[in-house]
């Protein structure tokens, strides 16, 4: 057995055995620390040294908010067993620790998970792992997700188009940054939002964005800057809008080229063929000028290369014989033709001759044409009704007071025949075939019918005076009397007096115009429009306020009913204002959020036929009951406002009643009606239109419509009513100008988040509102999601 002690000798002990013995000694020293002094313990552990090596990784790039894992090797390079606390630090602060116990010359791998700071910008941090004796350092680069949306490949870079032409515009958007991101891609025309799309791209991913917009409707050539823009980048191009040649109305044909008529003879028609040889749709007043006098005007509208025939009817030749020119004028062109008014025929006079068959004056035999006989006889158009005696087998023709006898012995005036023993008036009927003797009775003479026409003229003149004096009821009574007399006169004239029938027909036209004017004076323009506009029918009046009539009926362009706005009283200023407002509306009427126009005209009174949404709901109907539906409708209305701004058109009269809410498969759709018609008409007549939704600046004499935030106020006011069921202010000037508005969430059960977008839109200072309708609609929509 081997002795334990010095005698054994160190040379016989292996290195591992020596390390074990040292550890035992160190452990014994630790166990005895309760009785040994501190100085003794320190002296006994001085031999342990912990080094930190092989830190991995030393450089790390990562996203904010996560963790990184680092490892290192800790080795006890001392001569005795030791224990140390190993610390992991980030940016100088301890973020993790581990205690490591190692025998002399032993080592182990230590791993740490370090939290990465949640920063919003790119940052560099130092991290380290340290023992009491040494440390190792590394670097962590914190790179937030930073998608960058670059724009390239704009198409077209330059383009020349006509007003209203659809222009496709596209570009490539690439995420050249880090991480996945979402961005709004906007199309701008100059500074106006013309469209937007939302794209989501991973880093390095690309997409083609495509837009289509109509070129602005302008009268003069102009170059616009079109741009596709992201929050990070933009590309721009030039869009030149060149209007086509203006409308040019050419008189292609005029007929008849020559005409011969008697004084005051009725002329059936003077006709002109009009062609629009220009490049734009246009409207012109077509004039018929006879001599130096304009006798009739009418309005026509033609598209490029379209033609129409204009007929001027029911005309009378001048009373004085001579050669007259007549001209059809369009304002761009004219054409001339002539007609001749001949001397009236002079009836021959009798020289007292007997006119027997052998005389030189020329007797007439039984086979002579009655018309030839009549031409040689003096005619008295005032002759009274007559009865004529016929010889056996004879026949009589009554012309102008003469009895032309065939089968008898002579032609003579009835009174002469009667004095010679003929049958007196009322002697009895004649045989239509002339087989038996009888009497032919002429109930009313042409002269008497002409007298009736004069009486009808007097009645119609009186009715016009009564209408001008505002006595509509008497005017209607007078027209009723005239109508009865006209019907009787036309019936009595029959086929015998076509000139009387023609005169009666002329008076019927006069009568119908008068009756229509009386209706219009009472505020009902329906009969006038139906009479003058063939495309309109079955019109009924829905309302008549502020000088604007609203009708419902049919139009040949409408698939169903159409709604018609028309001026009830077309004074010049109101007519111009109405026509101008309709023209602006027409520029953008094809947009799905704008009420479409079927047709329009300024004759006989300014009118426009549009889509009929009667029976559908409006924002007013949703008020206080359907916040999501209101926000959807107002969002669509904002899109309509944005689209119309492309044409420099603003509504300026938004109310909850003019935003229709249609139900569709994708939810409610808002459609905006009445694009400033009512306000335009009211202001043209010198009045002020004030509603609870009127922007304060509209009440200022310094109002500048180009400022562009009036409709943002209107959208905010409509949204306020739709969300709360209450108007934002009273419909009074002082309330509107004061701008003291209670936040929506204090009026109705709404989230407070809706207050900010609505109240900002309703700022009395236009500069404090949103910059665009789009910005407001996006803020309003997101406010309900919070």
Image (cartoon, rainbow, N blue to C red):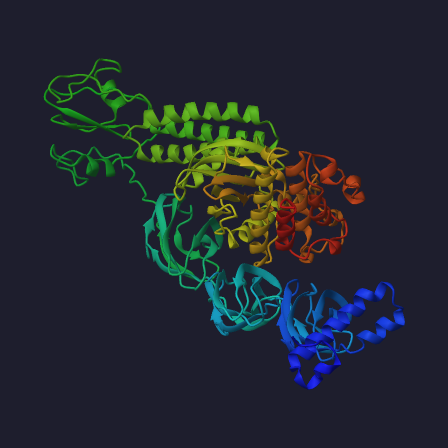
Residue located at (21% from left, 13% from top): 428
Residue 663, how many percent across, how many down? 49, 39
Residue located at (30% from left, 33% from top): 379
Residue 220, how many percent across, how many down? 55, 67
Residue 89, how many percent across, how many down? 74, 70
The answer to which of 340 and 504 lies nearer the viewer is 504
* Quadrant in the picture for residue 22: bottom right
Q: Residue furthest front?
A: 1
Lateral position of residue 76 relative to residue 461, left or right: right
The answer to which of 118 and 237 lies nearer the viewer is 118
Q: Is residue 550 above or below residue 708?
A: above
Residue 364 appears in the figure: yes
The answer to which of 439 and 276 lies nearer the viewer is 276
* Quadrant in the picture for residue 406: top left
Residue located at (54% from left, 40% from top): 660
* Quadrant in the picture for residue 658: top right
The answer to which of 480 and 647 lies nearer the viewer is 647
Q: Is residue 338 above or below residue 344?
A: below
Q: Quadrant of the N terminus?
A: bottom right
Lateral position of residue 171 relative to residue 31, left or right: left
Residue 105 appears in the figure: no
Lateral position of residue 544 relative to residue 426, left or right: right
Residue 102, how many percent across, how many down? 70, 72
């Amino acid at each position: 057995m081997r002795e334990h002690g010095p005698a054994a000798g160190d040379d016989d002990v292996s290195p591992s055995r020596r390390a074990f013995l040292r550890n035992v000694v160190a452990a014994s020293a630790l166990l005895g620390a309760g009785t040994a002094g501190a100085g003794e313990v320190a002296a006994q552990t001085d031999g342990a040294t912990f080094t930190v090596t092989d830190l991995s990784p030393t450089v790390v790039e990562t996203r904010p908010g996560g963790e990184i894992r680092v490892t290192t090797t800790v080795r006890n390079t001392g001569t005795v067993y030791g224990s140390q606390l190993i610390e992991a630090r980030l940016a100088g602060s301890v973020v993790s620790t581990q205690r490591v116990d190692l025998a002399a010359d032993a080592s182990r791998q230590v791993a740490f998970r370090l939290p990465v700071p949640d920063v919003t910008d790119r940052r560099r941090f130092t991290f380290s792992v340290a023992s009491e004796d040494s440390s190792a350092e590394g670097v962590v680069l914190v790179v937030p997700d930073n998608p960058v949306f670059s724009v390239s490949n704009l198409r077209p870079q330059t383009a020349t188009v006509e007003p209203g032409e659809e222009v496709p515009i596209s570009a490539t958007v690439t995420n050249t940054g880090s991480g996945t991101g979402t961005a709004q891609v906007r199309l701008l025309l100059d500074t106006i939002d013309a469209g937007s799309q939302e794209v989501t791209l991973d880093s390095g991913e690309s997409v083609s964005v495509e837009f289509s917009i109509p070129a602005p409707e302008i009268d003069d050539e102009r170059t616009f800057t079109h741009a596709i823009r992201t929050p990070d980048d933009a590309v721009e191009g030039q869009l030149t809008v060149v209007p086509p040649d203006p409308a040019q109305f050419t008189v292609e044909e005029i007929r008849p080229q020559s005409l011969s008529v008697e004084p005051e003879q009725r002329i059936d028609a003077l006709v002109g063929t009009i062609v629009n040889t220009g490049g734009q749709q246009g409207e012109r007043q077509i004039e018929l000028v006879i001599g130096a006098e304009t006798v009739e005007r009418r309005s026509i509208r033609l598209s490029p290369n379209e033609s129409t025939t204009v007929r001027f009817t029911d005309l009378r030749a001048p009373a004085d014989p001579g050669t007259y020119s007549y001209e059809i004028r369009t304002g761009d062109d004219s054409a001339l033709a002539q007609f001749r008014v001949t001397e009236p025929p002079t009836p021959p006079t009798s020289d007292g001759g007997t006119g027997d068959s052998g005389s030189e004056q020329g007797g007439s035999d039984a086979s002579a044409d009655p018309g030839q006989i009549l031409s040689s006889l003096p005619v008295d158009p005032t002759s009274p009704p007559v009865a004529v005696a016929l010889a056996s087998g004879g026949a009589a023709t009554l012309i102008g007071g003469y009895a032309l006898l065939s089968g008898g012995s002579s032609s003579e005036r009835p009174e002469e025949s009667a004095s010679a023993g003929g049958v007196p008036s009322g002697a009895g009927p004649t045989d239509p075939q002339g087989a038996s003797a009888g009497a032919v009775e002429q109930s009313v003479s042409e002269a008497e019918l002409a007298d009736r026409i004069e009486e009808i003229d007097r009645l119609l003149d009186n009715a016009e005076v009564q209408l001008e004096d505002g006595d509509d009821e008497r005017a209607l009574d007078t027209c009723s009397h005239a109508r009865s007399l006209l019907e009787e006169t036309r019936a009595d004239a029959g086929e015998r007096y076509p000139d009387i029938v023609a005169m009666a027909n002329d008076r019927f036209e006069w009568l119908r115009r008068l009756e229509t004017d009386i209706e219009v004076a009472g505020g009902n323009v329906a009969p006038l429009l139906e009479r003058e506009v063939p495309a309109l029918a079955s019109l009924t009046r829905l309302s008549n306020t502020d000088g604007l009539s609203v009708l419902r009926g049919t139009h040949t362009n409408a698939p169903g009913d159409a709604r018609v706005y028309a001026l009830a009283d077309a004074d010049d200023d109101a007519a111009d204002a109405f026509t101008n407002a309709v023209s602006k509306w027409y520029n953008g009427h094809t947009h799905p959020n704008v009420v479409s126009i079927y047709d329009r005209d300024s004759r006989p009174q300014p009118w426009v036929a549009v889509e009929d949404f009667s029976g559908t709901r409006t924002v007013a109907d949703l008020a206080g009951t359907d916040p999501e539906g209101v926000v959807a409708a107002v969002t669509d209305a904002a899109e309509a406002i944005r689209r119309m701004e492309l044409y420099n058109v603003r509504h300026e009269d938004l109310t909850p009643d003019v935003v229709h809410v249609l139900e569709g498969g994708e939810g409610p759709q808002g459609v905006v009606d009445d694009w400033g018609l009512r306000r335009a008409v009211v202001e043209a007549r010198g009045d002020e239109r004030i509603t609870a939704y009127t922007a304060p600046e509209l009440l200022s004499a310094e109002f500048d419509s180009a400022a562009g935030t009036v409709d943002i106020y209107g959208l905010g006011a409509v949204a306020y009513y739709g969300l709360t069921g209450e108007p934002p202010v009273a419909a009074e000037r002082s309330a509107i100008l004061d701008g003291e508005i209670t936040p929506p969430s204090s009026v109705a059960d709404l989230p407070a988040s809706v207050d900010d977008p609505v109240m900002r839109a309703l700022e009395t200072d236009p500069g404090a509102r949103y910059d665009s309708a789009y910005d407001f609609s996006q803020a309003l929509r997101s406010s309900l999601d919070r």
